[in-house]
Amino acid sequence: MAEHDLSREERALFNPAFMALVCVRAVQGYEKQYRSACPIPVAVTAAVMALQPSIRTALPATLRSGLMNWLDENEAVRVAMGLNAAALAAVVRPGLLFALQIDVLRLQGAGLTGKARAVTALKDGPGQNTAIQKAAHQLGRWLPSTGSISTVLTLLGVQA
């Protein structure tokens, strides 16, 4: 998705600083749940999913919900990921790079770690921004619960 393909509203939402924050929130969720570095595909996938309103509204209320059952009950998630994942990943990646450049995320082996207390959630501004951050945090905790990220990506119908 080239910048000229985006509307003014999309350019404002998908700016690298906000995309960095969304990635950080996914990494924070993963670290909270697993106490280890977050695999890069988990951070990117969580951010891509969190950006999609149809997926955010379908997320379960609890982490106890099984990913495979949830996907079976929400076929629209696979459809949305198939249609949007590549384009959204293209706007998430510059945010991830920005987070690394400003040192709010760090590479640790093949994963990402957040700098302790370096970034907190934005609580003011449009409700959509808060909803995206909450979803990214939840997805960072929940996506790996099924197994390897390659399994999760296969279930979602996307490739790393």
Image: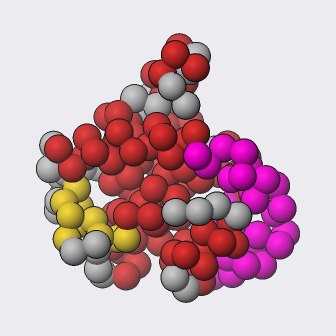
> If the image is split into quadrants, where does the N terminus sit?
top right
Specify start and end residues of the magenta stretch as a single range.
Answer: 59-86
Q: How many marks?
A: 0
Please provide percent x and percent y for residue 45. 52, 58
Name which quarter of the figure residue 37 lies in. Answer: bottom left
Q: Observer-nearest residue: 58 or 15?
A: 15
Residue 77 in view (yes/no): yes
Q: Is residue 51 visible?
A: no
Note whether 124 is above or below 140 in the view shown.
Answer: above
How far from the left and from the top, in percent, is residue 111?
A: 29, 70
At 83% from the left and 72% from the top, the residue drawn is: 72
Residue occupying the point 70% across, 64% down: 157
98 relative to 105, above or below: above
Residue 85, percent from left and from top: 61, 49
- Look at 55% across and 41% down and name the residue there: 88
Colour mode?
A: secondary structure
In this view, 46 is above or below 22: below
Q: Pick whichever, 62 or 39, lies toward us.
A: 39
For the stretch drawn in magenta, the main secondary structure is: helix
Q: Position of residue 135 (x, y in %)?
A: 54, 55
Q: Going by the image, does 137 lie left or right of 48?
A: left
Q: Magenta stretch: residue 30 in it? A: no
What is the residue that sits farthest to the bottom in this orientation?
A: 147
Residue beneath the point at 22% across and 74% down: 109
> Height in image: 142 above or below 51?
below
Please indicate whether residue 72 sits to the left or right of residue 37 in the image: right
